[in-house]
Image (cartoon, rainbow, N blue to C red):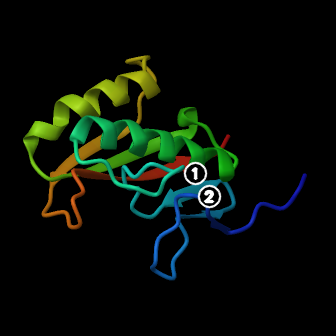
Amino acid sequence: MPRIPRSIDVPGLSHNAPIPQAARVGAVLCSSGISGKDASSGKLPGDARTQAQNAFRNMEALLAAGGATTGDVVRLTIYARDDSVREAVNAEWLRCFPDPADRPARHVLIHDLQHGMWLQLEFMAVIQ
């Protein structure tokens, strides 16, 4: 089996900080903050719905780069600018985790996000 690097980065999702977008040790994969920017343009859309769609797609790309799927996610933390973001987040949550008997733990924290962000995701996955 090929060695999976400890630091995980996906082209188009990079940021200016000298930290990886995710890290894997053994079967555990954890992300740094995942924004809702468009991976192809690098731009952050102005609305919560598009940011939520992008953030969940970006999460899926990081999971794949780390050898995981949404089925391996055991916890998802969502930082939201305010409660109005929940509707957009819930739509993507249900798309990624449609089975109520097989969803990760989830917590939403209201947070003063910077640079026009409506939300940010962090996940923990255990790869089976």
- The residue that mark 2 highlights is 10
Which residue is pictured at 65% across the width and 44% down the height? 64
Residue 17 appears at what percent x and percent y?
A: 45, 80
Question: Does 28 sit above or below residue 51?
Answer: below
Left or right, 12 with respect to 94, comes to right
The quarter of the displayed image where residue 9 is located: bottom right
State the residue in front, 54 or 104.
Answer: 54
Question: Does 24 sit above or below residue 123?
Answer: below
Which residue is pictured at 47% across the width and 52% down the height? 124
- The residue that mark 1 highlights is 62
Q: Is residue 97 visible?
A: no
Residue 106 appears at what percent x and percent y?
A: 30, 41
Question: Does 77 sit above or below residue 49?
Answer: below
Between the C-alphas of marks 1 and 2, the distance is: 6 Å
Residue 87 appears at what percent x and percent y?
A: 19, 29
Residue flagged by tag 2: what amino acid is it? Val
Question: Do tag 1 and tag 2 residues touch (Cβ < 8 Å)?
Answer: yes
Residue flagged by tag 1: what amino acid is it? Leu
State the residue in front, 100 or 89.
Answer: 89
Which residue is pictured at 90% across the width and 52% down the height? 1
Within 10 angstroms of label 2, few (less than 14), some, or many (20 or more) residues?
some
